[in-house]
Amino acid sequence: QQRTVTGLVVDSQSGESIPGATVMVQGTQRGTVTSTDGDFSILATNEDVLRISYIGYESRFVSVGERSHLIIELKLETFSFDEVVVIGYGQVRRDDATGALVSVSSRDFNRGAITSPQELIAGRVSGVQITSAGGAPGSGAAIRIRGGSSLSASNEPLIVIDGVPVDNDGVSGMRNPLSTINPSDIESFTVLKDASATAIYGSRASNGVIIITTRSGQHGKIRFNYDANVSVGIKTNQIEVFDAEEYRQVIYDRFGENSNAANLLGNSRTNWQDEIFQTAIGHDHNFSMAGAYMDVPYRFSVGYSDQSGLLKTSDMKRYTASMNLTPTFFDDHLKVTLSLRGMFNENRFAPTGAIGNAILYDPTKPVFDENSPYGGYTTWMDGDRPASFSPVNPVAQLNQRDDTSEVFRSIGSAKFDYRFHFLPELVATLNLGYDYSNTDGTVVIPENAAFAYRRAADGTDISGEHRVYTQDRKNQLLDFYLNYNRDLPTIQSRIDLMGGYSWQHFWREDYVHATSINRQYLIAPERTIPTENYLVSFFGRMNYSLMERYLLTLTVRHDGTSRFSKDNRFGTFPSLAAAWRINQESFLQNSSVVSNLRLRLGYGVTGQQYITSDNYPYLARYSLSQSTARYRFGDDWVTMARPSGYDANLKWEETTTYNVGVDFGFYNERINGSIELYHRETTDLINEIPVAAGTNFTNILLTNVGSLENRGVEFNLNLRPVVTSDLFWETGFNFTYNKNEITKLTVVDDPGYQGAYTGVISGGTGNYAKIHSVGKPANSFFVYQQVYDENKMPIAGLYGDRNGDGEITIDDRYHFHSSAPKFLLGLSSRVEYKDWDFSFAGRASIGNFVYNDFAASNANYRYTYSNTYIQNLPKSVLDTNFESQELLSDFYVRDASFFRMDNISLGYRFADLINQNSSLRLSITVQNVFVITDYEGLDPEVFNGMDINVYPRPTTFLLGVNLEF
Amino acid sequence: FTIYEDPAAYRNVLAKIYGGLSLTGQVGPDGDQDVLGIDEGTSSYLRTYWYMQDGTTEMALWIWNDPGIPELQTNSWTPSNEINMGMYSRIFYQITLANEFIRESAPGRLQDRGFNQTQQNEIALYRAEARFLRALSYYHAMDFYRSVPFVTEDDLVGAFLPDQISTQDLFDYIESELLELEDLLVEPLQNVYGRIDKAAVWMLLAKLYLNAEVYIGTAKYTETITYAKKVIDSPYELESNYERLFMADNDQAKGIIFPVVADGINAQTWGGVTMIACSSWASDMNAQAFGINPWGGNRARRQLIEKFPDYSGETDQRAMFFTQDRIMSAEVIAEFSNGFSVMKYKNIDINGIPGSNIEHLDIDFPLFRIADAYLMLAEAVLRGGSGASSSDALAAVNAIRDRAFGDESGRILASELTLEFILDERAREFYWEAYRRTDLVRFGKYTSADYLWEWKGGIYEGRELPNHFNWFPIPASDMAANPNLRQSGY
């Protein structure tokens, strides 16, 4: 029996009416929109269910029943105040969070042909810098949270996938261990930045924690989703070199038309860079099914991705499958979360050295030479063999090196949450997890590959290579913890106590064996290296909330690691945080302007135990030498046994963090954001420093010496300038400033000690362009000050005499900026108009400097001609006209500040395609749209600031389809 | 558990101490390097030793600007010099390895571990050789740095700061160690190839005494003669074919008392003779026929060439220079054709068959050879030592000259036998064998203005150096790590 039902739609928080909200009767085409006062009126029966939706709010389903007037409260989608965020070993109401943590859900992920999960949140979170290793498919990415707290130890954050902290070591045969995870299975990232959030992870938390939560099923109707895209990536930039005619002239000018060098010229016109790059084609398909069967929510998904790289032959194929089951038993007293995922990757790696060779190879030579015995590829010869040190034909280098890997990985966990029958405030949780992987890699280079030419003992050629490597990893986890959560209304308090135990075991075994292709010459002898380590921890946390206003969090973790000696094995990492929800005070409670205002203070100590990939750095160990490093005693070649240097007292680094944060929200969260100030000091820095001569089996020892500081400011702002029924506009901005300074490096304060060199360069032997010095940022460039002539041309070999001793010596090198950016900015925006959606995201890095290693080595005339071969050079040589390498000139250290438009996406959604639950969204995305920079190399975004054969990042165009039913 | 529970392991550790003189890590030719903070190939004991002994004199000049080299070869180094750091670190690496071995092979420990008498005797001999290798490195430390941190087997591994020993005390320590070892090592030529015998102890004692005035201000020329004579009277004899001492099969040559072994298959390195030979050959020298991958980096400076009145090699056969398309003067450091190329080291055997590997050579480095005992004896006599006569001295020099010329045409008269002549003769006999700096210092010519060579002090004509350039600075890295150390002169 249809009747008229009236109602009012209001904001659940402020109680204000919401105009323009859509009200639909489920299963029909009947619908209406609320008036300017938020009222509506609609025909419905008592059995009907109304669906009320409004952009920016969570949709609600309301049964009509007997009522004639309905008041429907809608909750803000992202900022709903009952929302929980995932933290270590539990979750917390967003309201009660006291630490600096940021959660990014799938809706805010970056768009594009993304095969590496890290890229999903690049530029989205202040204080987090994500730098991909290059444009190769599935390429790795370095993550730095608040500048990195270590020098020699790992600066990567701890990554926890569905409660399983994963190994810091890479998976062999993968460009990126995380790219084994299908990005479309990821529900959210939570980035824990300050110690009060991370200290629960104790000795692994110094560089922040990223918690990845994957999607799971929900009660309700079965839902299918098919998501796919095809992508085309193109190269947009190349290093300018002399073309064939120009190069011929260079050779004539320098050596004469009848010179030996000129006789080496050919007659072709080859653009070698065009020969090695291709259009990168990719496609990606994901299918998922989610719902509930017999009251058990489930989600299954399968994915297939095939991405070819910009550099010819590079390719990645990935097959993924995942299953999530979340059954409950005993009236929801026992909740089980089963998560199982498997991935299979097939990779082919292209040697990036081909990029350098493409620049250096003589453009007057053809790619192929039918007389060449080396696979028909043009090759520089010295008599009857390939010329030593000459550029390698880059096309041969790509085609003749078959470098592939197959990687299988599975990560799974079973989590049991039991709410005690007699004491429902108490929940016991058992989490069992594993992370296994298996890698099979081979490198095959045929005998006729000139670049792998080798000669045997008896003079025969035993070239080529057959290399096999495998890796097995087995990591296991057991967590058990109890959680007691209780409201104490009599004292207006709420208390949440958690305490537990964690055990984790990491085991891996690497194997390698390499010979010449005919198996007769040993390149790398067969080696199997097993290694393992254990972590054992006790941890606890107390959250206390008084009058919904005053919040206190205490955490402590007691961590033990097998990496250190018994005396140093255990450490305790405490943290303390307090928050004051100022908007809950009486003077703001009824404010129509301020919807959220919170002050947070945090202090904590965290550690870094991942100091080296070596699991036994505190032990004196003897290792046996390889067959190529033996010593002769009479007729025997005796294997050498060598003790390794060690520090029996090695222990973790400790980072003390102070954090002040203010969260704010105005006009019903239409404007919201946060400001954070932090100071982090790392002491007992794991550092490789010269050890007093004669005291150890090494001259540079990994030990705890020194300290460094990071200070910074972070700012996040989210705006929703327009929220109407047809138009929704959201934009986000974030800003990061970080200053890093080394405060101590050695046992003895010696003003004469310059510091520890780092950043090895390609030119010469053993040259370093960077240094860690006291009083300077880590990774500062350490170079000579170039002197220029009146035409602003650098004068070769002439540098500033900075110490004024009248001579240019190594003491005239100076600290010149650092590779770490001073400022990071992120900007993203999303507009939805009716069924259209448009979004973009970009980010800027300011004050990051890059050493142009390629130009330093090659933009000079020194190696143009060398007896048996000639080589091309970058046209940037014209900026210097250097005759020889001026490797450590500050001319090559350049400001590489940039703005990169990461992606622009436009989509259209066909709602109610088959029925109300089905929809189709089509989208066009451009990824890596443009880069604005003054840097003259290929790409200013170079992790660690050393520009050496960077795999170019393509500009990619995607066509995407998402079908939901 | 320790590796020393196994009696067989002692041999492996001893191999590491010997191997530390030529190899750079546990993989070969590179990988898992021993000494850090420096390119692995460059970090070789012999390579850094050669750079500092020959590369800082008229012997050789690199065209490359690898870290540390420009300052070394123009005598303008500072405590931050990478190669000096590498040498110093190598020396103490050897000493630390030896200390551990000596500690673990103490007679009491061997008994505690239940080894039988044969095993104990064998290990006792290893221990004596390890002590010799430690004394050798301390000798190099004294020759380069005079006064250095001092550690023995009594100092355990770990975080402590060693004290600096005076040059006099270090001299006395090396002397007493060697005098004790004389009785503990096997008779000359009774050990297997690659391991040392008593003659090595005598050689080192003779060197120690010959240079005693430099180190401790006290002349010990009589003692020099005593030990040089023991070597000369030993079963070692002069190899008749000078060239053969520097070839791929020089393990078959006579007169090499202490070879530092290399091998293209089993002992691969970028240091040692591989560096010396590959850097001196260039692609226009038909290097492949000599089993050498030519790097084209090092050549002789003019003053070395001028030591040979006839540098063609037709009279004095030790002159092995490649002069085609070369000029004698090295006015441009970076130009390989400025200066004659040196063909002293050849990776072929006596029948002209190339060595096992063109990249890593088979030539063993003759660290001590008997010819040095002949010339040390002659010099010590001229310097007033007793125990040998002037005619012994002349005979010793002429024995070397006879071999060099292949007949008696190179003989000199007693009147021609001067200290000046000895110094020049040592250049002709031992060029590119890492003797030169020590010799020039002993003759007072390393820093003084009365002997100049191309680029000495950083100018082509050469110039006087400050007196403290007679030794090297303790590296800045160790000064920062160990506050007990005092730097002298720098």
Image: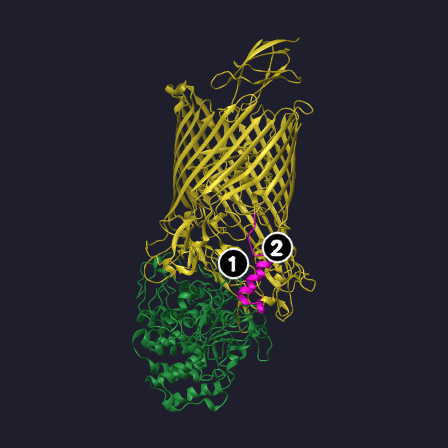
Chain colours: A yellow, B green
Q: Quadrant of the C terminus of chain B?
A: bottom left
Q: Chain of mark 1?
A: A
Q: Residues within 10 Å of mark 2 (few under 14, many from 20)?
A: many
Q: Which residues are magenta?
A: A237-261
**Residue A740: x and y, percent?**
40, 45
Secondary structure at numbered mark 1: helix
**Residue A40: x and y, percent?**
57, 13
Residue topped by disc 1: A858
Residue topped by disc 2: A271
Residue type at mark 1 is Asn
Q: Is residue A217 above or below residue B9?
A: above
Q: In front of the other: label 1 or label 2?
A: 2
- Of residues B54 and A931, the one drawn nearer to the viewer in this rendering: A931
- Of residues B479 and B191, the one drawn nearer to the viewer in this rendering: B479
* Residue A305 shows in this picture: no
Q: Is residue A154 above or below residue B94?
A: above
**Residue A542: x and y, percent?**
43, 30
